Image (tube, rainbow, N blue to C red):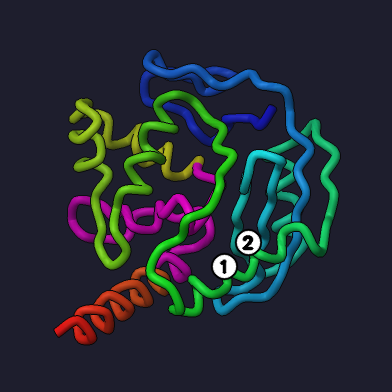
Amino acid sequence: MPQCEHAQCEHAQCEHAQCEHAQCEHAPCPMPIYNITDSELGRLLVGGTEKGICAVSLGDTDIALEQELMQQYPKAQLNKNDSNLNRWLDLLKSYIADRQEELTLPLDIRGTAFQQQVWEKLQGIPCGTTSTYSQIARDLGRPKAARAVALACAANSIALAIPCHRVLRSDGSLGGYRWGLQRKQALLEKEYKLLDNINIKSR
């Protein structure tokens, strides 16, 4: 199963990063396939299982992206596949290139119960808008858990489709982003521009 090593809650420090309110899924490890292509934000890796997309990563080199996927699935035999993931790759590349407003993709999401609650909230943030770690914590009924929310965002392994780039600090600064703050800024600017264009066309 994928490790939850990046998802430490402020309430606990343990092998599987279990929070008092969440438990990691101990499901059998899937056998992901993956492919890597170029995009406007660098190299783009998409990994998938029979259930759906399990990884979307952005980076500078294929080796770094493959190592990240291996860390996510340390006991799985990863298989590079050039055909089965093409449709998902094309949709993600189109999204990055400003050609569509939202992503609707099948996802294979694995994490603690708390992480999945956070990731569900992230998927509800509309394109062109943002939220904050504190606001999401309040929406979950845990107003003091902003740090735990930030850690859950950092543990997200499915960029774009689970849009953790839309979450900022309360002061409006970018906060963190596991695929680089420059990419986070670029994604936000693209989405703001896309939303402006949609609003202009609707007038």
Q: Secondary structure at mark 2?
A: helix
Q: Quadrant of residue 80?
A: bottom right
Task: Examine the rendered structure and indicate whether residue 194 appears above or below residue 172.
Answer: below
Residue depicted at x 53% and y 59%? 179
| Viewport quadrant of the N terminus | top right
Q: Secondary structure at mark 1?
A: helix
Q: Quadrant of residue 11?
A: top left
Q: Position of residue 190 (x, y in %)?
A: 38, 76
Residue highlighted by disc 2? 88
Q: Position of residue 155 (x, y in %)?
A: 50, 40
Q: Are marks 2 and 1 in contact (CB under 8 Å)?
A: yes
Task: Examine the rendered structure and indicate whether residue 62 appears above or below residue 3.
Answer: below
| Viewport quadrant of the C terminus | bottom left
Which amino acid is tagged 2?
A: Trp
Is residue 111 highlighted in magenta? Answer: no
Q: Main secondary structure of the magenta part?
A: loop
Q: Position of residue 165 (x, y in %)?
A: 39, 58
Q: Nearer the viewer, residue 60 or 78?
A: 78
Residue depicted at x 66% and y 21%? 27
Q: How far is disc 2 from disc 1 in space, using C-alphas?
A: 5 Å
Residue highlighted by disc 1? 91
Residue depicted at x 54% and y 36%? 6
Q: Which residues are magenta?
A: 156-184
Q: Nearer the viewer, residue 116 or 171?
A: 116
